[in-house]
Each structure stands twice: as C-alpha cells, then as structure tokens.
Amino acid sequence: MRLDDHMMADRPGDDDGQTDLLTKTKPKTKRPPLYKVMLLNDDFTPMEFVVHVLERFFGLNHAQAFEIMLTVHKKGLAVVGVFSHEIAETKVAQVMDFARRHQHPLQCTMEKEE
Ligand code: TYC
C-alpha cells in the first residue's frame, strides 16, 4: 500500500494482501470568501450621479445602472457586485472618495457573503 498526501487506500492492483482502508482527508484548498458591495439610499444624492457611479466603477451599462439605482432608491439598498476582499475594498473606497469629492452623502459598504 502506497501513501500520498491525502489518502491511504488500496488501489486496484495493489496486491499487498492488506485490508482496503480508506482514510481520506479533505484537500484543504478553501476558496477565498466573497464580499457583497452595497449602495445605500439617501435623500440627497442625485439619481444621475448614482447611475454614473454604477457605470464608472462597476462596469454596468446605462440600463443596468439605472435599474439598480432605482432598486436602491425604492428598497433602501442593493447589492451592486460581489468581489474578493481586496477588490471589494477598492470599490468601496473609490465610490466613497468620488462621492465625497462631489459633496454627495452617498454611502457604499461591503459585507461578507454567507
Ligand atoms: N434617493 C435619491 C434621490 O431621490 C437617489 C439615490 C439612489 C440616492 C440611490 C442614493 O444609492 C442611492 N435623489
């Protein structure tokens, strides 16, 4: 019986006369967690500004951007994309900085996906 990193098992033709034992362990390559990036509604940021943000930083076309902006406006918030931790942080920072420079109170946050 030969051993490797992840299992001890008899293979076909492994005629060593030993009982077949299966002692498998999960290969421990975990996919990194993903993060939802969300926009929050407010009463002051112009709709066109939010649409522009969604086009500029999230690569949405005008129709997609308008639809998500309306969802945020009506529901209070919406997920605008799902990214790795580093990309999500960058998106949040870009949106918050852009909004601040234009003196709009638009808020963008991130949250780990369950
Ligand atoms: N509620 C804003 C308005 O009526 C529009 C708006 C939409 C603001 C989405 C923020 O994330 C937002 N001008």
Image: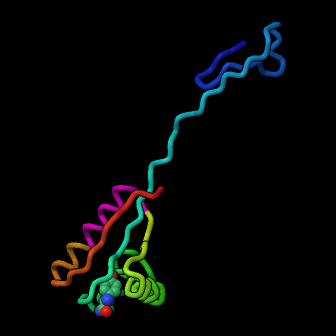
The quadrant of the picture showing ligand 1 is bottom left
Residue found at x 44% / y 65%:
82
Q: x, y percentage for residue 110?
A: 34, 64
Q: x, y percentage for residue 62?
A: 43, 89
Say which of 21 and 59 sits in front: 21
Q: Residue furthest top?
A: 17
Residue found at x 43% / y 72%:
79
Quadrant in the picture for residue 61? bottom left
Residue 38 painted magenta = no
Residue 65 visible to an observer of this rendering: no
Q: Give the magenta range.
A: 83-95
Residue 84 painted magenta = yes
Residue found at x 37% / y 87%:
73
Compared across the picture, whether 20 is left or right of 23 comes to right
Residue 13 visible to an observer of this rendering: yes
Q: Main secondary structure of the magenta part?
A: helix
Quadrant in the picture for residue 49? bottom left
For residue 3, above or below residue 29? above
